[in-house]
Image (spheres, coloured by chain):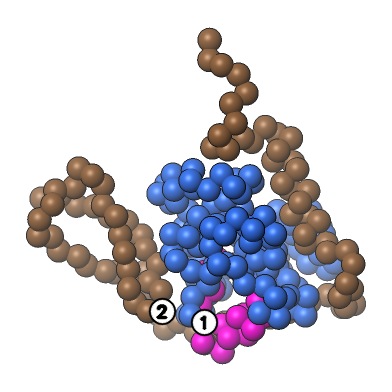
């Protein structure tokens, strides 16, 4: 199975997976045994870097996180997705999601037809894509 | 001959759907897929690779959600209303 992750889910998976919702935790667990693939939008990578740069995660700096992000390129269970003009243009349809970054992440999941790993109530309530958390 | 190049992500069901530009001529065409890497891909284990020395609280404050919300507020403040459908003023 394939899924798209948002920033919040990916960061908790990297930092303290116990904080993930049970369904999201199961998907990440499946990915780490080769039974699922997690697609990571370029916007999510950007937001991960921004959160780390804000110093909100104790003991985590860019030097620790960047190698893990780069290693995704060589893996079969994580996929880094390029942000394309087609995705940006398609995102115009999803005005229910007010934040442009969140909207682009939702658009990536919508275009691929994959569920989105997210706790975000706005995304969940929009019904644009299936979401996975609890 | 017309050529259109695009990047796609191959999902695990190995089915891909693409949309070509309207001016791309209809009719027979050839499709070739190139993978980006020929190297063997490995299964990556990332659970808890950034774990702190002290366990964070399982309830209450969510520092990641707070940081993300702060970033959203900063974007709103900076006037990032790109494609939100909001129009601040009429063009002269």
* Residue B14 to residue A110: above or below: below
Numbered disc 1: what chain?
A: A
Q: What is the CA distance from the residue labelled 2 to the residue labelled 1?
A: 8 Å
Q: Indicate the chain coloured blue by its letter.
A: A
**Residue A36 - label:** 1
Question: Mark 1 falls on what kind of element?
Answer: loop
For disc 1, the neighbor class at 10 Å (few under 14, some 14 to 19, many from 20) is some
At horizontal 69% and vertical 60% (from top left) the residue drawn is A120
Numbered disc 2: what chain?
A: B
Task: Verify CB contact (< 8 Å) between mark 2 and mark 1.
Answer: yes
Residue A31: say if magenta: yes
At horizontal 70% and vertical 34% (from top left) the residue drawn is B78
Q: Do labels 2 and 1 share a chain?
A: no
* Residue B91 to residue B80: above or below: above
Q: Which stretch did the figure color magenta? A: A24-40
Left/right of residue A103 with respect to residue A76 in the rendered view: right
User: Residue A33: x, y in percent?
Assistant: 56, 89
User: Can residue A91 be seen here?
Assistant: yes
Farthest residue to the bottom: give it.
A33
Which residue is the site of mark 2? Answer: B12
User: Residue A22: x, y in percent?
Assistant: 71, 81
At horizontal 58% and vertical 38% (from top left) the residue drawn is B84
User: Can residue A88 be seen here?
Assistant: no
Q: In which quarter of the image is residue B7?
A: bottom left
Which sits in the foreground, B71 or A110? A110
């Amino acid at each position: 199975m394939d899924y798209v992750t948002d920033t919040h889910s990916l960061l908790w998976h990297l930092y303290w997976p116990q904080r993930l919702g049970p369904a999201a935790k199961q998907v990440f667990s499946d990915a780490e045994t080769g039974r699922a693939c997690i697609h990571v939008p370029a916007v999510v990578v950007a937001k991960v870097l921004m959160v780390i740069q804000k110093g909100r995660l104790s003991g985590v700096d860019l030097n620790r996180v960047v190698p893990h992000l780069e290693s995704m390129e060589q893996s079969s269970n994580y996929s880094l997705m390029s942000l394309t003009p087609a995705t940006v243009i398609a995102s115009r349809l999803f005005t229910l999601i007010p934040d442009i970054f969140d909207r682009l992440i939702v658009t990536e999941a919508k275009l691929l037809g994959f569920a989105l790993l997210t706790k975000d109530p706005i995304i969940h309530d929009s019904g644009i894509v299936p979401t996975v958390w609890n | 001959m017309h050529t259109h190049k695009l990047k796609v992500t191959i999902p695990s069901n190995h089915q891909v759907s693409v949309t070509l530009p309207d001016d791309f001529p209809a009719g027979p065409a050839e499709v070739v897929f190139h993978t980006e890497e020929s190297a063997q891909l490995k299964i990556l284990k990332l659970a808890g690779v950034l774990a702190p020395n002290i366990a964070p609280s399982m309830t209450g404050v969510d520092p990641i959600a707070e940081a993300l919300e702060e970033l959203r507020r900063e974007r709103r403040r900076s006037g990032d209303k790109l494609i939100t459908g909001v129009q601040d003023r009429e063009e002269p």
